[in-house]
Image (cartoon, rainbow, N blue to C red):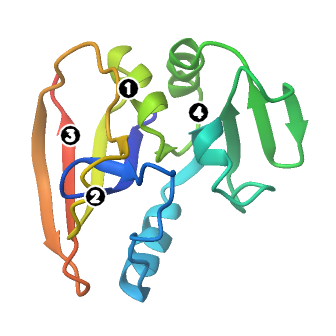
Amino acid sequence: MRKVTFGVGNSLDGYIAAPDHGVDWLQWTKEIADISATYWKTIDTVLMGRKTYEKAPKEGYPGVRNIVFSRTLPEGSRGSLEVIAADPAEFVTRLKEQPGKGICVMGGGELAATLFDADVIDEVVLNTHPVLLGSGVPLFPGLKRRVDLELLAVRTLENKCVLLSYAVRR
């Protein structure tokens, strides 16, 4: 069965975007680019919600299947990008059973919460930035159940961010 990983940059106080949905506080470095490039080789599918898609490259990420879950965008394919109106939990449950590499849930706390509630996420990777936003878009809005995690790794990055990796306990 394929592994589903939720990865996101977050503030120390648990936000993934500022109140205006800005992410100018995220620190992108060569080290993060190298970590991302290594990880990218282990996946073949990226999942995102509409709000995350609005911040992503409009043609999607190269070399992978790009799936956007949205009830407002027109459903269908646009090159390597697929817009799907179906229930994300049901779709990802079926997707995990298909052959392929890992699946990345890119940003998007609302989509992640839906997938956590359905118990389809296997791993969480947080790039925690040394900033307190005070308010904004929460990391896990509306999570309906407790999710127990097991720490896999902690890494302090050159830019003083902390990369945390957790497995979802079942």
| 3D distance between C-alphas at marks 1 and 3 | 16 Å
Q: Amino acid at mark 2?
A: Leu
Give the residue drawn at x 53%, y 45%. Answer: 101
Distance in Å between CA atoms under marks 3 and 4:
21 Å
Q: Identify residue for label 2.
A: 133
Q: Nearer the viewer, residue 112 or 44?
A: 112
Q: Is residue 49 above or below residue 7?
A: above
For this rendering, which residue is in front, 3 or 126?
Answer: 126
Residue receiving disc 1: 113
Distance from Cα at disc 1 to Cα at disc 4: 25 Å
Relative placement, left or right, of 105 versus 124 is: right
- Sequence-wise, the earlier of marks 3 and 2 is 2
Q: Which residue is mark 4?
A: 99
Residue 120 figure quarter: top left
Residue 37 picture location, percent across and down: 50, 72
Amino acid type, callout 3:
Ala
Q: Which residue is mark 3?
A: 167
Residue 1 visible to the viewer: no
